[in-house]
Image (cartoon, rainbow, N blue to C red):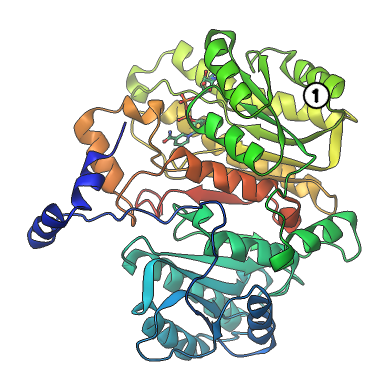
Amino acid sequence: MADTYLNLVNSPLPARIAKALGLPRPSVLRRYTEGEVLAPHPVLVAGAGAGADALAEVLLGWDIEVRRHVLPGEALSAAVVVLDAATEPAELAAPMLELGQAVRLLVPGGRVVGVLRSVADASGPAEAAARQGIDGALRSVAHELRAGATANGIILRGEATTTDAATLAALRFFLSGRSAYVDGQFIEVSAVPTGSVTDLAAATAAAGEGVSDQPLAGKTAVVTGAARGIGAEIARVLAREGARVVAVDVPAAGEQLAAVANSVRGTALQLDITAPEAAARILDHVRERFGVLDIVVHNAGITRDKLLANMDAARWDSVIAVNIASQLRMNEQFLASDAFSDTGRIISLASTSGIAGNRGQSNYAASKAGVIGMVRAQAAGFEGTGRTINAVAPGFIETDMTARIPPLTRQVARRLSSLQQGGLPVDVAETVAFLAAAAAAGINGQVVRVCGQNLVGA
Ligand code: NAD
C-alpha cells in the first residue's frame, strides 16, 4: 500500500503548506543503488585518540575525504564520532559539541555514527556513566536529525577495536543507503580470533575498495515465507549479493513462490514450516543440490490479533507455532546436521511488538519476544565458533501484513517514528544481508531494529 502522503508532501506546493501547518514532512530516503558512492562529500571523524586516528586512516583508504574538524560551511556526507576512550562524562563535551556543528552541515540522507565501548566492560561507575551517556546522546541526535538523516552507534565489546573487520562492516552498513530505515540503533561488535577462517574472510570482505559486490557468492541461503512481502525481498537482496536462494513457503502460495524463486534464479520448496519434518526437507533439498547450508533466514510469520480478553486458543496457538516453535525445532535439527556450515548464519525476524508489546498482539508479542530470547541464548552457545545468530526487528513496514491495518490507524502508525514514514521490505532485507556476510563474523546475538527509530518501545 503506497504512502501517498509521503509522495504528496515531497512536491513543492504541498511541502510549503505542510510546513506552514506544522504537519509531518517525511523525506524520500537515500536507499542503496548499484554503484553507490559511500560518501560523495567529506566525512568528519571527530574524537581524539589512537582509535579515532586509526579509523580516519581506514576511511582515507576507502577514498573518502576525511576531516578531523568541521570546516565552516562545508557540506558533510557523514559525521563519525569516536568516543572509545571516554572514561568519564566530562570528556563527552568536546566531541559532542563538535558533532553539533557537523549535523548542521549534513547533506540530506546524511549519517551520524558513534563508536563507543560497551557499558558491560566498564571499569567503574564513572566510565559506565560516560559510555551509557553516549548512548543517550546519540539516540537524542537521531530524534533531532531531519531530511532522512540517521544516527546509529557501534559498540565495541571486549578487545574489539575501531578497525576490526566487524566494526568496519557495521560502519560501511551505517554509512551506506542499505541502512536507510535503521535509526537510533546500536550494534555490538566483538573481535574474532586473529587468524581464524572467519577472521580472514571478514578482513577480506571489509577491506574497503576491495569489497566484493557479491559478498555472498558461493553461499546457499534458505528464506522462509519467501512468496511475498519481506521474505520475497530478502530472497532478492541475498541473490543480488551472490547467494543461491532456496525460497520456502506454504503450498497455497506455490505460484507466487515459483515466481520469486525464478526471478532470483533460485529454487522453490513448498512446505509448511510447522511440520515436524520441515527442517529435514530443507536439509535434503540443500544437500542434494548445493551440499552445504550457509544462511538460514527465519522470516515466515503470521498475526492473529485480538485483545487478550477475547483471545481464543486457535489464534494463540497458531501464532506461537509458526513464529517461534517452528524456529526452535528447525534450528535444533540444522545444528545437529553436518550439512549446516561451520560459518553458518541464522537470522530471525522479530518485531518491535516483541520489544515494546502492542495492543491486541499479546500472542504475536509473545512469539516475537520469544525469538529475541532464543537468539540471545543460542548466540551464547555460538560464542567462539564461526557461527552467528541475530534478530532483525522491523517496525512498521509497508507490506500485505500492515495493509490490513485500518486506514486511519495506518496513517498514524507510519508517522510515529523519527523518519515519519513506514519502511520498505528492502530495508529489512538489506539488514539481513549485512548480518549474513562473512564480514559480520563478530556480530552475534544482536537485535537490530529496522524501524526508523519508532517511538514505540524506543
Ligand atoms: P506477509 O504476511 O506479507 O508474508 C509472510 C509469508 O510467510 C507469506 O508468504 C506466508 O505464506 C508465509 N508463511 C506463513 N505461515 C507459513 C508457514 N507455516 N510455513 C511457510 N510459510 C508461511 O508478512 P511480512 O509483512 O512480509 O512479514 C515477514 C516477517 O516480518 C514476519 O515474521 C513478520 O512477523 C515480520 N514483521 C513484519 C512487520 C511488518 O510491518 N510488515 C513488522 C514486524 C515484523
* Front-most of residues 130 and 242: 242
Please state which of residues 433 and 260 is positioned toward the viewer in this rendering. Answer: 260
Tell me the residue that label 1 is attached to. 286
**In which quadrant is the N terminus drawn?**
top left
Residue 419 as seen in the image, left or right of residue 164: left
Q: Is residue 323 visible?
A: yes
Q: Residue furthest top?
A: 252
Q: Nearer the viewer, residue 222 or 33?
A: 33
Within 10 Å of the Cα at label 1, are there few (<14), some (14-19), or many (20+) other Cα atoms?
many
Could you say which quadrant of the image residue 276 lies in?
top right
Residue extending furthest toward the front: 35
Q: Relative to residue 319, is residue 305 drawn left or right?
A: left
447 or 142, nearer to the observer: 142
Position above or below: 448 against 139: above
Report the residue at 23% width, 35% height from top. Answer: 409
User: Residue 143, position in %: x, y?
Assistant: 34, 64
The residue at the point 80 percent across, 52 percent down is 383
Q: Quadrant of the C terminus?
A: bottom left
- The x and y percentages for residue 142 are 39, 65
Residue 225 visible to an observer of this rendering: no
Q: Is residue 57 shown left or right of residue 28?
A: right
Give the amino acid at mark 1: Val
Residue 333 versus residue 198 in the image, above or below: above
- 214 versus 164 height, above or below: above
| Number of numbered labels in the structure image | 1
Which residue is painted at 19% across and 53% down in the image? 11
Residue 415 at x, y percent in the picture: 27, 48
